[in-house]
Image (cartoon, rainbow, N blue to C red):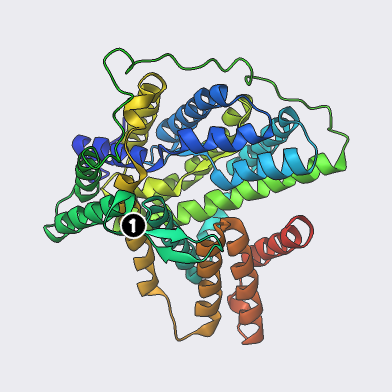
């Protein structure tokens, strides 16, 4: 089914890649319910809904696109859902879920057309490299921050954490173990680093095993009846409602586009084997948005943390299937899976960042019409985590600089159209 031989991979590699990816993004089960509960949604039900939404959407990616990418509720998207749409604009979460559903349906229509593939094929190479590098720096920063190597003062000034104890010490140990494995060219360096750091974290008091016992290790998931099929379409005649739909649609389309660009860059030369599946990946991503909305969730999106598994050699849907299966287990063994501390996963994210930043070796730094837009994309991405906005600014700058330098002929019609859409979005939507 997954054609492992053609993908130049193996069963063990795919399973290990899936495990590494799962450990890199298991935090979604904790963070997403916390964020969405801020708009009045039941947090216990959100845990189950988040797991189910991730399972369904990832299985769609697994069987439709047969790629090792995981689809789950997006972090920036959930903040916009709860903070802006519900708390700031006054929509109910049921109405926000309805907006996500409509945006997802529009996303499916676009994904079935040749437009998405055409956009991907004609993304300027400098922006493609910049998006990959920007996401890489963002992921590495998330790892360092979650591992307490980067901390902030009361004035929000960045500083280095206390290396002699606590999570920062465990992160350093994990980095050292991973580095040693990399130096020895071990294929499973990422996974070894996570496992060793988790075990070392037990005597350090960072890996919390106090709540785990044979009696409590299995627990039934909370029901999702409070969230399932609760969409409210009562504001279909409201212009603001359609503005929210457009914003969700735009964020979904270009966040996933940017993420796909980054993930394929991690595959290196193998990317050529899997790029033909990109249209199906777009379709799977859009179907994942609709599936999540039925559970009352903010939009699902392909996760950059999938790069952890891709970096380990994951190339097929079997890696994604492994992640989905682990999320199923997490519904009943949540305490066991969630005991892996963020500090143990931090080195994996740093390594993924390295792999993605290495794409810059192909950037033409001498041509400022190429390197300057790329630099802007990178710096905005890693400082704001707003993928679609950073790509929008870089895209517009690319068109302006090519025009100013007398090379307007190198800008394709598709690049002009997308640039105009970006301009309208930034001007009227933000």
Locate residue 62 relative to residue 280 in the image: left or right. left
Residue at coordinates 64% horizontally, 17% vertically from top-left?
226
Question: Which sits in the foreground, 237 or 64?
Answer: 237
Residue at coordinates 43% horizontally, 13% vertically from top-left?
220
| Residue 146 against residue 179 in the figure, above or below | above
Q: Quadrant of residue 336?
A: top left
Q: Quadrant of residue 319?
A: top left
Q: Position of residue 427 (x, y in %)?
A: 77, 62
Local crowd at mark 1 within 10 Å, few (<14), some, or many (≥20)? many
Q: Position of residue 110 (x, y in %)?
A: 63, 44
Residue at coordinates 56% horizontally, 66% vertically from top-left?
380
- Residue 133 shows up from this direction: no
Q: Which residue is mark 1?
A: 350
| Residue 139 against residue 298 in the figure, above or below | below
Q: Position of residue 423 (x, y in %)?
A: 72, 64
Question: Which sits in the foreground, 21 or 394?
Answer: 21
Residue at coordinates 65% horizontally, 70% vertically from top-left?
396
- Which of the image's four quarters has the N terminus? top left
| Residue 121 against residue 4 in the figure, above or below | below
- Residue 194 shows up from this direction: yes
Q: Position of residue 370 (x, y in %)?
A: 51, 78
Question: Which sits in the foreground, 167 or 418?
Answer: 167
């Amino acid at each position: 089914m997954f054609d492992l031989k053609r993908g130049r991979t193996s069963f063990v590699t795919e399973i290990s890649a899936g495990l590494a990816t799962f450990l890199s993004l298991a935090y979604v089960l904790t963070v997403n319910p916390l964020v969405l509960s801020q708009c009045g949604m039941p947090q216990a039900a959100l845990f189950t809904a988040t797991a189910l939404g991730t399972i369904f959407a990832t299985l769609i990616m697994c069987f439709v696109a047969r790629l090792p990418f995981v689809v789950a509720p997006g972090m920036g998207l959930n903040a916009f859902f709860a903070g802006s749409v519900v708390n700031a604009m006054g929509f109910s979460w049921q109405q926000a879920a309805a907006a996500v559903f409509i945006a997802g349906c529009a996303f499916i229509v676009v994904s079935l057309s040749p437009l998405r593939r055409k956009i991907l094929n004609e993304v300027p190479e400098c922006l493609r490299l910049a998006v990959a590098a920007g996401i890489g720096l963002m992921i590495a920063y998330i790892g360092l921050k979650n591992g307490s190597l980067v901390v902030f003062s009361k004035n929000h000034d960045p500083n280095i954490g206390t290396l002699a104890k606590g999570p920062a010490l465990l992160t350093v140990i994990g980095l050292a173990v991973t580095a040693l494995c990399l130096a020895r060219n071990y294929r499973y360096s990422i996974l070894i680093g996570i496992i060793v750091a988790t075990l070392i974290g037990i005597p350090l008091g960072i890996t919390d095993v106090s709540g785990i016992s044979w009696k409590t290790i299995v627990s039934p998931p909370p029901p999702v009846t409070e969230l399932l099929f609760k969409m409210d379409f009562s504001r279909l005649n409201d212009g603001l409602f359609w503005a929210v739909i457009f914003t969700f649609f735009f964020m979904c389309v270009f966040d996933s586009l940017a993420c796909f660009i980054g993930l394929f860059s991690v595959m290196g030369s193998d990317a050529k084997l899997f790029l033909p599946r990109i249209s199906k990946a777009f379709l799977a991503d859009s179907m994942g948005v609709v599936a999540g909305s039925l559970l009352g969730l903010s939009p699902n999106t392909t996760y950059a943390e999938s790069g952890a598994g891709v970096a380990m050699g994951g190339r097929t849907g079997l890696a994604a299937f492994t992640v989905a299966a682990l999320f199923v287990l997490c519904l009943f063994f949540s305490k066991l899976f969630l005991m892996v501390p963020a500090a143990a996963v931090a080195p994996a994210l740093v390594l993924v960042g390295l792999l993605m930043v290495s794409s810059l070796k192909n950037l033409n730094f001498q041509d400022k019409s190429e390197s300057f837009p790329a630099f802007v994309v990178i710096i905005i991405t890693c400082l704001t985590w707003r993928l679609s906005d950073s790509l929008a600014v870089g895209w517009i700058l690319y068109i302006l600089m090519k025009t100013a330098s007398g090379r307007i002929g190198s800008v394709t019609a598709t690049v002009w159209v997308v640039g105009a859409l970006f301009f309208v979005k930034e001007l009227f939507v933000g």
